[in-house]
Amino acid sequence: MSGPASFGIGEVLGRLRAEFPDISTSKIRFLEAEGLIEPARARSGYRQFALADVERLRYILTAQRDEYLPLRVIKERLDAIDASAPTRRPGAAPADTVPR
């Protein structure tokens, strides 16, 4: 049995580009540097994005595009969502509706 799906940054771009044509590798790296996303790292150092990370990116990009929210406000909203999320046991399936 394999573990949860993970995607490289190029695959993430492919999943988001239709909805967000201006998305770029540097934008994803910037959002990580700003603390809005925290993708796992492979031993080689490459970012590994879970499906929850992709959905979190979609939430961030939608809030920027549709609500014109600054990153500070988006981060506050994500922090509130994270704080209200139930704590998972290691190995438990992630919640489907809560961005990580």
Image (tube, rainbow, N blue to C red):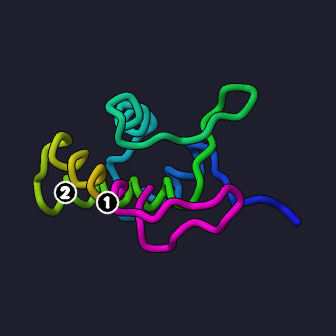
Q: What amino acid is found at the position of numbered circle 1 in the picture?
A: Ile
| Number of numbered callouts drawn | 2
Residue under numbered circle 2: 65
What residue occupies the far bottom of the structure in this picture? 96
User: In the rendered structure, which segment of residues is drawn in magenta?
Assistant: 81-100
**Disc 2 to disc 1, C-alpha distance:** 20 Å
Residue at 88% in and 66% down: 1
- Asked if the magenta segment contains residue 48, the reply would be no
**Residue 32 x, y percent position in the rendering:** 41, 35
Q: Can you say which quadrant of the picture contains the C terminus?
A: bottom left
Q: Which residue lies furthest to the left in this view?
A: 68
Q: Quadrant of residue 92?
A: bottom right
Q: In this view, does 57 lie above or below 93?
A: above
Which comes sooner in the sequence, label 2 or label 1? Answer: 2
Residue 47: image location, x then y, percent: 60, 36
- Where is residue 76? Give x, y as percent: 21, 47
Quadrant hosting residue 2: bottom right
Q: In this view, does 37 lie above or below 46?
A: below
Q: From the viewer's perspective, is the residue at label 2 or at label 1 nearer?
A: 1
User: Where does the image place residue 50, in percent across and percent down from the top left?
Assistant: 59, 54
Q: Is residue 88 magenta?
A: yes
Q: Residue at x 21, y 58 (%)?
A: 63
- Identify which residue is drawn at 19% across, 52% down: 64
Q: Is residue 34 left or right of residue 6?
A: left
- On the picture, is 11 further left or further right than 42? left
Q: Which residue lies furthest to the right in this view?
A: 1
Residue underneath mark 1: 81
The dominant secondary structure in magenta is loop
Q: Residue 39 is drawn in which quadrant?
A: top right
Circle 2: element type: helix
Q: What residue type is labelled 2?
A: Arg
* Label 2–label 1 contact, CB within 8 A: no
